[in-house]
Image (cartoon, grey):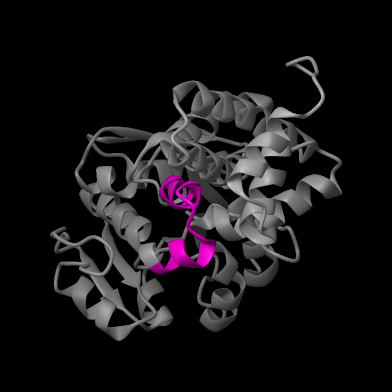
Amino acid sequence: MSKIAVFGGGSWGTAFSTVLADAGNDVTIWARRQGLADQISAGRNDDYLPGLELSSSISGTTDPAEAVEGADIVVLSVPSQSLRDNLAGWGDVLGDRIIVSLMKGVELGTTKRMSEVIAEAGGVPTERIAVVSGPNLAKEIVQRQPAATVIACPEESAADRVAAAVATSYFRPYTSPDLVGAEVGGAVKNVIALAVGMAEGMGLGDNTKSSIITRGLAEMTRLGVALGADARTFAGLAGVGDLIATCMSSLSRNHSFGVGLGHGMTVAEVQEKTRQTAEGVKSCASIYALARDHDVDVPIIEQVNACVHHGVSVHDMVHALLSRARKSETD
């Protein structure tokens, strides 16, 4: 049995903590608010996963040092755009532990992936940073529905340690050395899910949604390969697997956010209604900037960014995509 710290008491942080506890670990969740930490210690998380009874092996705290005391592994599960500030607030508590990132985004301004932010702001060597990515919708995970995931880390022994810590009868981890590919897949799929949700909200059918997913996968792969990822990663769980789940499920925040936009709501109106973080809304700007910096063609990401941040209507977005010059599918 290991002691593991999870920084972030939201839906996915709590769901992942449940997996860790079911795998036989003692888990301490760091939460920003004392009220949430107290809820977690009392065996529930009514703010994010109401009705879930947490394992007695899970406790909560607002003290970063208390969270990591005795921990072998630290899991980070905070909104991607707040990661750098959180790392500054936590100080040097991460130590020489393996750091696991559950975050799926690209930092605004720097266009850095989450592992790059952890390395830079947290002083953690890349070989001690692992990324979890795959079709892992939090609500299904806490219901113990079977799922698989990828633990990506350039250091094989570190990936194996994390995989051993999360393996349960319903949660199957695979390992990969492709940290870049797992992170690109995890970030880009959120933006494509916004586009699919917009199409659904407009009343468009499965042909449209399937076309967006497939061409979105092409954009994901182009960008990932340009950044040094293995193209094969995008045919696996961290690529097409996570993409399908996020684009097609009503449990996906990004998909649901896109549906609201497709219904004609503004970004502010959808945010007010959902009251939860849809990572693609903020990250689409930084992902598009990253693609431009590497001269990668990403028309779906470009148009989603135009809708979310520049007032382009979803109808104009569809027209812009369909009126592009014809080309070979494999170019």
223 lies left or right of 308: right
Magenta segment includes 259:
yes
210 lies left or right of 109: left
The N terminus - image quarter: bottom left
Res 281 → quadrant: bottom right
Residue 93: x %, y % from top left: 50, 77
Query: Is residue 89 or residue 44 the one in the foreground?
Result: 44
Q: Is residue 14 above or below residue 322?
A: below
The secondary structure making up most of the magenta span is: helix
Query: Is residue 11 or residue 167 the one in the foreground?
Result: 11
115 lies left or right of 268: right
Q: Is residue 106 above or below residue 291?
A: below
Magenta segment includes 326:
no
Res 163 → quadrant: top left
Residue 22: x %, y % from top left: 21, 49
300 lies left or right of 291: left
Residue drawn at the location 67% of the way across and 53% of the way down: 312
The C terminus - image quarter: top right
Residue 53 visible here: yes
Residue drawn at the location 66% of the way across and 63% of the way down: 117
Residue 74: x %, y % from top left: 44, 62
Query: Is residue 17 or residue 10 the one in the foreground?
Result: 10
Residue 155: x %, y % from top left: 60, 43
Residue 125 visible here: no
Magenta-tinted stretch:
255-272
Residue drawn at the location 62% of the way across and 72% of the way down: 84
